[in-house]
Image (cartoon, rainbow, N blue to C red):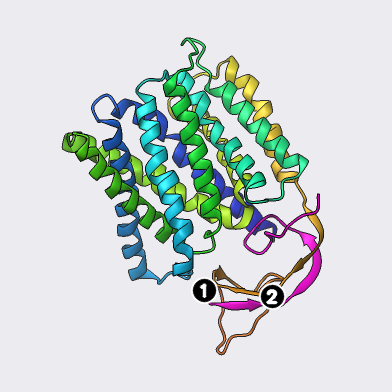
Amino acid sequence: MAHAKYRVIAQAFLASLFFAMSAPIAKILLVNVDPVMLAALLYLGSGFGLLLLKVTLHQLKPSAEAHLTKTDMPWLMGAILAGGIAAPIVLMCSLRNTSASTASLLLNFEGAATSVLAAVLFREALGKRIWMAVILVTLGSIILSWDRSERMSFSIGALGIVVACTLWGLDNNLTRHISGKDPVMITIIKGIGAGVVSLCMALLLGNRLPSLGYISMAIVLGFFAYGLSIVFFISALRHLGAARTSAYFGTAPFIGALLSFVLLKEVPDVSFLFAVPIMVAGAICLLIEKHEHTHTHPEFEHEHRHDHDDDHHNHDHETITNGFHSYRHKHCAITHIHPHTPDIHHRHEHGR
């Protein structure tokens, strides 16, 4: 079971890695691309890029993921509206009127917003170590993102970035409810849906299509930073819950800094040296967290990708099924104790 845990953590870090490249490159593209148009191209790149990838992979091996159903649509539509349409447009408009240092600092608010919403609105169980991890990772990200050469300023643009982060926090929590379904298909629908709506808005606002070169760069950036990043994020959500996944995701600035040292031969500065122990402490809080208590699973049915190597999938099939597969199955009522996170089988209420 330990290797499965670390695989999920790796997915959260990969989501963080791909997203880490988005803000600086988007800032460069905004010089020649209107903000709403750029938001549209980023999501169209994620949606159509993943659609092409899914069709290609399906020819090699059919997916074992569960399909989306009608009951999933309200959650998906809410996530698209909050995180796919509203948040990117608000962010792109705000980036034009906000310094790079201020924007980098404020983008770290997404993890905190996700955790607060998860605890307050969706009753996700967060222990002291998780709250400490969220605080440490956010603090480390702020230190790492702080550009002391620029004057720190707060404005309507800065407020817009906070709003965008809150909308993404809501998006993360809404997506958590459907994280058991095919993450690639969720991201395809989200990308194409949000991209088409944003493109229509951009054209109505008089935004012009940029040159083919800028379109290509935006689409490629969208495929990695919004497409693959969201796929890995959703995959981690189903096992870790919204707050824990967002805490790992909050290491994006740290990962970006490490990449710059390795690839660009940059020299670590004072901010990095201060941020390292704080980030490491936050990561340790996440890794050593152990949430264990006697809990009861009521009888329920659902469908998701699974195998039979854990304590929650001992049901029988009409035919022998080995390896990962998707099948609507029933969980009988059971009371037991074991270490767990707020995954798709452990979203129970906790006593105060």
* Distance from Cα at disc 2 to Cα at disc 1: 19 Å
| Residue 11: percent from left, percent from top | 54, 50
233, 70: nearer the viewer: 70
Judge whether residue 339 is colored magenta.
yes
Residue 118, above or below 304: above
138, 175: nearer the viewer: 175
Query: Mark 2: which amino acid?
Result: Glu
Q: Residue, x 60% and y 48% (percent of image)?
A: 242
Query: Mark 1: which amino acid?
Result: Ser
320 to the left or right of 336: left
> How many C-alpha atoms fall within 10 Å of the one at disc 2: few (<14), some, or many (≥20)?
few
29 to the left or right of 286: left
Q: Secondary structure at mark 2?
A: loop
Residue 3, above or below 155: below
Which SS type dominates the magenta stretch?
A: loop
Q: Residue, x 72% and y 71% (percent of image)?
A: 298
Residue receiving disc 2 = 299
| Residue 284: percent from left, percent from top | 72, 39
277, 203: nearer the viewer: 203
| Residue 162: percent from left, percent from top | 50, 30
Q: In this orientation, does residue 40 appear? A: yes
Stretch of the chain drawn in magenta:
327-352
161, 3: nearer the viewer: 161
Q: Secondary structure at mark 1?
A: strand
| Residue 254: percent from left, percent from top | 55, 30
Q: In this orientation, does residue 14 appear? A: no
Residue receiving disc 1 = 326
Judge whether residue 346 is colored magenta.
yes
> How many C-alpha atoms fall within 10 Å of the one at disc 1: few (<14), some, or many (≥20)?
some
